[in-house]
Image (cartoon, rainbow, N blue to C red):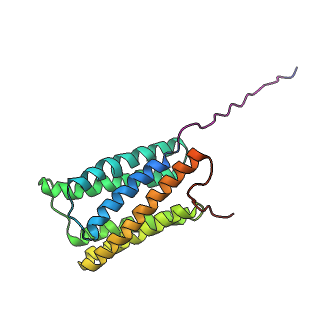
Amino acid sequence: MENLTNETVVTFKDTTANPAPLGLFGFGITTVLLNIHNAGFYQISSMILAMGIFVGGIAQVIAGIMEWKKNNTFGTTAFTAYGLFWLSFVCLLVMPKANLAAAPWKNEMAAYLFMWGVFTAVMFVGTLKMNRAIQVVFLSLAVLFFLLAFGKYCESDLLMKIGGWEGIFCGCSAIYTCLAQVLNEVYGKTVLPLCPVKK
């Protein structure tokens, strides 16, 4: 007598929201505000530190965790890593003021920024299968990290100011990508183009 086994396959539809706009906004707005400082318009204050902790840091980490639930390795890695970048950056500024550690030497900050540039450059390679908007964000971010790294290493105010302006562009591109995803989803059509890569 045959044993017949009836298997039922249950497929769950993902109805959770897209966390990428939150992560892109958190990254974009803090990048713009910090790089207005790098461009020479104002000093670092509690405004940048608070935005770095809560919007650039915590909001991006939350977005990264949400991307993990969506099985998105790229999004998880990017948002969590850059969220922790912002938290570490704030600690680099605050810890010396609180006498918890020595302030980083210029070569140490250059190495810190350079390694983030290397990471971002490799992540940019991953965006080549994504849309043009996200490619612009990651390419401009890699350029930003390298400009700031060499600016710190060479103690060049000019490179830091160029990096500041480039960083403003990078942050604005992230904000644009965030808003495009939100508005396109709300209206169910392309309101702001993301320019998908043709396969």
* Picture layout, residue 194 above or below residue 76: below
Q: Is residue 20 left or right of residue 85?
A: right
Question: Which residue is most to the right?
Answer: 1
- Quadrant of the frame with the N terminus: top right
Q: Which residues are magenta?
A: 3-17
Q: Is residue 119 visible?
A: no
- Quadrant of the frame with the C terminus: bottom right
Q: Quadrant of residue 91?
A: bottom left
Give percent across and percent down for residue 75: 50, 52
Give percent across and percent down for residue 153: 26, 76
Q: Is residue 147 magenta?
A: no
Residue drawn at point x = 24 percent, y = 70 percent:
40
Q: Nearer the viewer, residue 42 or 136?
A: 42
Q: Is residue 136 left or right of residue 5?
A: left
Q: Is residue 108 visible?
A: yes
Q: Is residue 106 left or right of residue 146?
A: left
* Picture layout, residue 174 above or below residue 145: above
Residue drawn at point x = 38 percent, y = 46 percent:
59
Question: Which residue is most to the top?
Answer: 1
Magenta: main secondary structure equals: loop
Give percent across and percent down for residue 89: 28, 58
Q: Nearer the viewer, residue 99 or 38?
A: 38
Give percent across and percent down for residue 2: 86, 23
* Picture layout, residue 91 above or below residue 123: above
Residue drawn at point x = 40 percent, y = 62 percent:
171
